Image: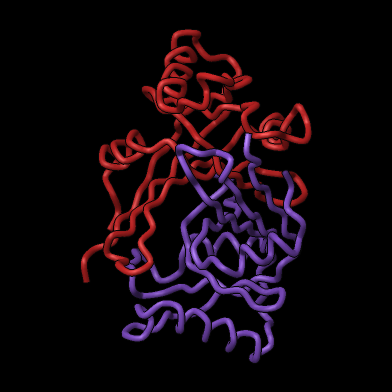
Chain colours: A red, B purple
Amino acid sequence: MKLVESESLARLAERNHGVLATIHSERGVDAVPVVFSVDDGFVAVPIDRVKPKSSSKLQRERNLEADPRATLLIDHWDPDDWSQLWWVRVELRWETDVDDDVAVRLADRLSKRFAQYSDKPFHRLLVFRVLNVSGWAGKGE
Amino acid sequence: MKLVESESLARLAERNHGVLATIHSERGVDAVPVVFSVDDGFVAVPIDRVKPKSSSKLQRERNLEADPRATLLIDHWDPDDWSQLWWVRVELRWETDVDDDVAVRLADRLSKRFAQYSDKPFHRLLVFRVLNVSGWAGKGE
């Protein structure tokens, strides 16, 4: 059954790990697991130094420069009881001009949630505006 | 660190749940959690009746008819120890003309893995050819 928007947003706010998909002009979709924070219509994804990367500008950033649309998916998986499954999908648009207040709040949430960032702060944030939220949850059979 | 292809494929073969992303002409990326099976260069995703759906043809099918490219992502998440993180990403192309042998093997694997399909067989299979596999795993700090 579809989730109402408020329920989808509530489930999104309780999570901090999902899959971010962006568009690669040739390959189609790029998808990568990310951590994120949410604040009042915005989602932030850190680019960090905790996980070694092979280049300074990530493919997802090059993708977003060419096409600012992105999608974030979170889901609950239970291999045995599919009545417990649910997911929330967020349509996003990458924003390069975000209020400092918003960016600071999003950054604070990430830092507070993940002790990893105490030692090694993330390098920068990708900030997205939430365009649409949808969700689905299984029913008991 | 990047995973070599054989290692990525080995991790893919051990999983059966991931995120499938397809391209929506207007919204950009559609992403949805799926179960899947793998066999010798092909990936199958069932369209089933276990989870009630609101329409007979899913958005992902309409997307694939317009653009057969898709991406499957699996990942391992550990909020506390990021040295344990890994993911595998599979570039796929939807195939409508698949050998019966291949389709049967892919279907068998799904049926054997998920008892849910004993009671309610899936309705049909989306079969994809694997075009490329890449993967990444965190190092211990």
Residue B17 versus residue B46: which sits nearer the camera? B17
Instruction: State the residue at coordinates (35%, 62%).
Output: A78
Q: Is residue A56 above or below residue A82?
A: above
Residue A9 versus residue A66: which sits nearer the camera? A9
Residue A18 versus residue B100: which sits nearer the camera? A18
Residue A92 falls left or right of residue A85: right
Image quadrant assignment for residue B138? top right
Residue A65 versus residue A138: which sits nearer the camera? A138
Q: Residue furthest top?
A: A100
Image quadrant assignment for residue B104? bottom right
Q: Residue furthest bottom?
A: B101
Instruction: State the residue at coordinates (46%, 37%).
Output: B80
Q: Is residue B27 above or below residue B106?
A: above
x%, y% of residue B134?
72, 54
Q: Is residue B75 above or below residue B140?
A: below
> What count of labels does the image hold?
0
Instruction: State the residue at coordinates (65%, 47%).
Output: B137
Residue A118 falls left or right of residue B135: left
Q: Residue furthest left?
A: A140
> Which quadrant of the figure contains the C terminus of chain A?
bottom left
> Which quadrant of the figure contains the N terminus of chain A?
bottom left
Instruction: State the residue at coordinates (59%, 55%).
Output: B73
x%, y% of residue B31?
51, 52
Residue B39 falls left or right of residue B17: right
Residue B40 falls left or right of residue A85: right
x%, y% of residue B18?
52, 59
